């Protein structure tokens, strides 16, 4: 709010008799600028409305001042904690110790549900659910769901192993494709360890959602310094964040259409560039963020016809041959999404193959966090799903 401005040359009684324009003449230039800035800020905030990521409403929906109500602890976390279908927060275990930021639960608990729903309506706010405790949801959001990977070592390949959801991967000792720095606590090795000095005290969810601002809008291009889905790194001060245009309902199947979905930022890399060229602070793309831990999968080595070792990523989807039949501008497939050089104005020649074209982020109901059952993608059999969305002549 603007601060109180008082002319110095008159008493309060005298000032009350002055017309409005006389008051303004006694305000200094600096004070006028401050007042104008305050008015403009208020006007812009009212015009902007409320974005999906900005939390408002009753503070008690998320916070507890003393972690005590009616003689019982308010905060709950641990196995099974989450939102019930009636909007109450239950299950898990009562936390006798307060949770950081005076929250009623941790990140995992607040974004979990004990029902099948994947968006919880809480007053005027909606909470995206990424972990359903009973079963894999029938309508998962864009990032998928952690349910399968939470079931134990047998399901390690079904999602990212995250602290508070699953244990450290029983087979892998580091993130696949990682050869970067990293100690035992580093997010480059695993997200399944507690926050500690080795991961900048951002283990688990904050290993990826590094800078969480639940009281800011999640805007497309850092209009208020909030990155896409809070995806930043410890190099954020150098511009290492992700850009994109977020779907208002996080791609909930009931609200997703050919034109209403996430628009990811992509980059078409020079074939002569190596993995290190895909720097987050240079491209701000979703794949460059993945490359922070899986950088060897982003090398241009081994993606040619004669050295076919892995599927290429960070390249433009060809416009000729079998790929000509998939135009994501006019017939976007959420099951096989592409990124865009400019997410705000998608162009066919700027459609980019990215990590999320094949994989979910959080977890999947299929192995290798894939978007579809790879064992059912059979060449020569009529099928328009999965790989055949792009490879249209191979089914």
Image (cartoon, rainbow, N blue to C red):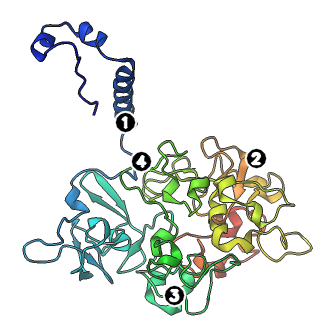
Q: Secondary structure at mark 1?
A: helix
Of the residues under marks 2 and 1, which one precedes in the sequence? 1
Q: Kindly identify which numbered label has been placed on residue 45.
A: 1
Q: Where is residue 99 drawn, in percent x and y?
A: 29, 73
Could you classify mark 2 by the number of other residues whose Cα lies within 10 Å: few (under 14), some (14-19), or many (20 or more)?
some
In the figure, 107 relative to 277: above or below?
below
**Lower position in the chain sequence, tag 1 or tag 4:** 1
Query: 116 above or below 344?
Result: below
Contact, CB < 8 Å: mark 4 with mark 2? no
Label 3 sits on a secondary structure element that is: loop
Rendered location of residue 72, percent (x, y) = 12, 77
In the image, taking residue 77 as reference, residue 37 lies left or right, namely right
Mark 2 or 1, closer to the camera: 1
Q: Is residue 365 visible?
A: no
C-alpha distance separating marks 4 and 3: 33 Å
User: Considering only order in the chain, which callout, 3 or 1, is on the residue closer to the N terminus?
Assistant: 1
Q: Dot 4, crowdedness within 10 Å: few (<14), some or many (≥20)?
A: many
Q: Identify residue for label 2.
A: 349
Residue shown at 35% from the left, 17% from the top: 28
From the viewer's perspective, tell me whether residue 297 is left or right of residue 206: right
Between disc 2 and disc 3, the foreground one is 3
Screen quadrant of the N terminus: top left
Give the residue at mark 4.
Answer: 217
Secondary structure, mark 2, is helix
Can you identify the residue that label 3 sits on?
A: 168
Spatial CA span between label 1 and label 3:
43 Å
Q: Quadrant of residue 120?
A: bottom left
Q: CA distance from mark 1 to mark 4?
A: 10 Å
Task: Please report whichever mark, 4 or 3, sits nearer to the chain's N-terminal start.
Answer: 3
Tell me the quadrant of the picture where the C terminus can be found.
bottom right
């Amino acid at each position: 709010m603007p601060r109180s401005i008082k002319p110095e040359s008159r008493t309060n009684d005298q000032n009350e008799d002055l017309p409005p324009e006389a008051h303004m003449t006694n305000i200094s230039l600096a004070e006028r600028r401050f007042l104008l800035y305050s008015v403009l800020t208020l006007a812009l905030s009212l015009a902007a409305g409320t974005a999906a990521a900005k939390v408002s409403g009753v503070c008690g929906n998320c916070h507890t001042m003393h972690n005590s109500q009616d003689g019982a602890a308010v905060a709950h976390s641990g196995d099974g904690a989450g939102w019930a279908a009636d909007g109450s927060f239950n299950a898990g275990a009562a936390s006798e110790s307060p949770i950081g930021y005076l929250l009623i639960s941790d990140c995992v608990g607040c974004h979990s549900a004990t029902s099948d729903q994947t968006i919880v309506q809480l007053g005027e706010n909606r909470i995206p659910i990424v972990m359903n405790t009973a079963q894999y949801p029938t309508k998962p959001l864009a990032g998928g769901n952690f349910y399968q990977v939470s079931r134990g070592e047998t399901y390690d390949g079904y999602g990212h192993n995250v602290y508070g959801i699953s244990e450290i991967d029983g087979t892998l000792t580091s993130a696949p494709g990682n050869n970067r720095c990293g100690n035992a606590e580093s997010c480059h090795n695993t997200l399944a360890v507690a926050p500690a000095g080795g991961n900048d005290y951002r283990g688990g969810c904050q290993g990826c959602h590094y800078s969480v601002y639940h009281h800011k809008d999640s805007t497309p291009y850092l209009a208020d310094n909030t990155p896409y889905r809070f995806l930043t790194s410890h190099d954020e001060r150098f511009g290492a964040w992700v850009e994109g245009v977020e779907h208002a309902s996080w791609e909930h199947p009931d609200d997703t259409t050919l034109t209403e979905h996430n628009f990811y930022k992509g980059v078409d890399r020079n074939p002569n560039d190596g993995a290190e060229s895909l720097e987050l602070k240079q491209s701000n793309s979703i794949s460059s963020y993945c490359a922070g831990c899986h950088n060897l999968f982003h090398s241009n080595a081994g993606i040619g016809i004669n050295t076919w070792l892995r599927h290429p990523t960070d390249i433009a989807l060809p416009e000729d041959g079998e790929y000509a039949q998939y135009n994501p501008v006019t017939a976007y497939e959420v099951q096989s999404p592409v990124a865009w050089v400019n997410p705000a104005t998608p162009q066919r020649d700027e459609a980019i193959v990215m990590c999320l074209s094949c994989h979910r982020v959080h977890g999947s109901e299929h192995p290798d966090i894939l978007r579809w059952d790879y064992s059912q993608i059979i060449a020569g059999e009529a099928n328009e799903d999965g790989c055949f969305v792009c490879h249209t002549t191979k089914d």
